[in-house]
Image: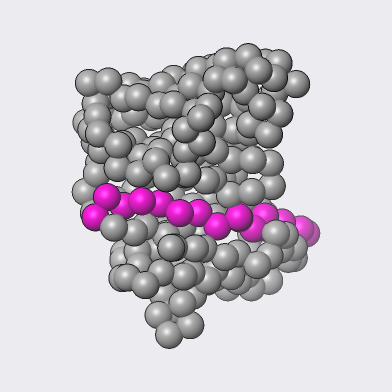
Amino acid sequence: AQRVTQPEKLLSVFKGAPVELKCNYSYSGSPELFWYVQYSRQRLQLLLRHISRESIKGFTADLNKGETSFHLKKPFAQEEDSAMYYCALATGTASKLTFGTGTRLQVTL
Amino acid sequence: EAGVAQSPRYKIIEKRQSVAFWCNPISGHATLYWYQQILGQGPKLLIQFQNNGVVDDSQLPKDRFSAERLKGVDSTLKIQPAKLEDSAVYLCASSSGQWNTEAFFGQGTRLTVV
């Protein structure tokens, strides 16, 4: 069965500091991984997906199949990055989406 | 494009009562998901539809929860009878159904069972 683990419930960093939100997954097949974000009072929305290999709002994430990880990184945190971040795994041809428990990122001055 | 619409936004009921949630996905989206998000936890998939057929309902408590997607468009999720532990946000999401596409989420319905 597929599983997504986000070990940190809360990550607090200073503005301008580097950010790394950890995500590990368990899946025997070929994984498709995503990061979703939920800003205060907004709906859950896609931030980025591993297959696109793109940088969104300065965030990047690299799939490491050896370590079964998909950590989210940003070199310099901004106040507007404060939000709830969820790592998600899509499996099967029907794209079943399994979410981790989420990490709250708090960027302070 | 219009987003995923859910109603109601909030609902408070007593335990053992029944409740229904409605979802209107993005037009043309074949896949529709219902998630339950308990406070402090990530969204948990309850049921996934592809058009009007069920793809996965392995985590749906079928003794009290039911869902349907008649005509492959709108969907309703029902709880009967509700328990205290059903208090959560119920999220509806839709996607085009193609491999590895983005899921778009509604605002959710916050259910409180007292």
* Residue bounds of the magenta highlight: A93-109
Q: Does A101 appear in magenta?
A: yes
- In the rendered view, would you say A20 is above or below B50? below
Picture residue at 60% right of the left edge, 55% below the top: A101
Q: Position of residue B53 (x, y in %)?
A: 25, 34
Question: From where the camera sits, is residue B65 visible?
Answer: yes
Above or below, A27 against A80 in this view is below
Can the viewer see residue A56 in this picture?
no
In the rendered image, which quarter contains the N terminus of chain B?
top left
Seen from the viewer's position, the closer of residues A17 and A7 is A7
**Where is the C terminus of chain B found, in terms of image quarters?**
top right
Which of the 4 quarters of the picture holds residue A14?
A: bottom right
**Residue B11 on the magenta span:** no
In terms of depth relative to the viewer, which is nearer, A83 or B77?
B77
How many numbered marks are there? 0
Q: Residue at x 65, y 18 (%)?
A: B16
Q: Is residue B91 left or right of residue B85?
A: left
